[in-house]
Amino acid sequence: MMKIEIKKLIYSDRKGFRLRIDEKGDLIVFAPYNATRNDVLQIVEKKMNWIVRTRERILENLKKIKQNNFEEGEEFLFLGRTYKLAFWLKSGIELDEKNRKIYVPFADKTTVQRKMLNFYKSKAKSYLQSVLDKCSENMNIKYKKFQIRDSKTVWGSCGKNGSINLNWRLILLPEEIIEHIIIHELAHVVYRNHSKQFYNFVSLFSKDYKEKDRWLRDNSYILNLFR
Ligand SMILES: [Zn+2]
């Protein structure tokens, strides 16, 4: 049997068990008050495949997180493509599609970081707005308002009142993945859960949505960029 350490065992007033792998890859078990030691071991053993798979995925993603230094030649994402940072003496930021470079005014690290962040956020605002409007029309779902958010844990969310919040980091992802996330959030305007009906509805508009969700899980490190 595989040896997995239970990092935390938390008893509470709950009916069943819940297992969680935290962002460091540690296993946390939430158990009902009346659970015995044996119950805990049994549930862990039963869920071993899931635990191992999830841990591997999280540890793999942790390896991919690197601190950006904002130096020449460093790679940055934009709509799923990679661009190498290059400095120039002009004042704006520009993407060079042909040579896959992102030109940024030469400055100290903090200024470069701030300028790139502003660039990404403003690109995200207009790009995401256009995809949101396109999807909203296709799906015949109206949303209340749209806001750009800076989250380290979620790509997007849908408020109870039908407002859509999207992480500016979406602009780093491939276009078909961006569309998929927006379809997912718009579907929540109608379905406030992750039920079978919800996924049936999503599948009408987002082809291979399972594959795209898997891609997002495998690339969750992108949520940790620019922090
Ligand atoms: Zn959801």
Image: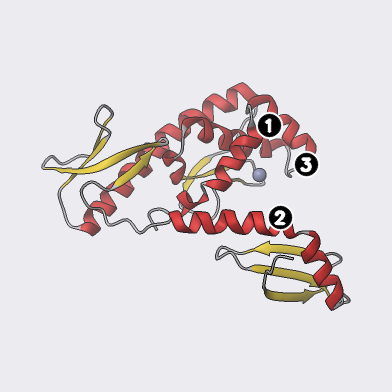
**Which residue has dot 2 on it?**
50
The image's mark for residue 195 is 3
**Does any portion of residue 116 appear in the rendered image?**
yes
How has the structure been colored for display? secondary structure
Q: Quadrant of the C terminus?
A: bottom left
Amino acid type of the residue that numbered disc 1 sits on in the rendered structure: Val
In percent of the image, x 75 and y 69: which residue is there?
A: 30
Q: Judging from the image, what secondary structure is the residue with disc 1 in?
A: helix
Q: Judging from the image, what secondary structure is the residue with disc 2 in?
A: helix
Amino acid type of the residue that numbered disc 3 sits on in the rendered structure: Ser
In percent of the image, x 67 and y 35: which residue is there?
A: 187
Q: Which residue in the rendered view is the most extreme toward the front?
A: 1
Query: Number of marks in the image?
Result: 3
Q: Which residue in the rendered view is the most extreme toward the top?
A: 138
Amino acid type of the residue that numbered disc 2 sits on in the rendered structure: Trp
Q: CA distance from mark 2 to mark 1?
A: 25 Å
In percent of the image, x 41 and y 39: which residue is there?
A: 124
Of labels 2 and 1, earlier in sequence is 2
In percent of the image, x 46 and y 39: which residue is there?
A: 173
**Which residue has dot 1 on it?**
202
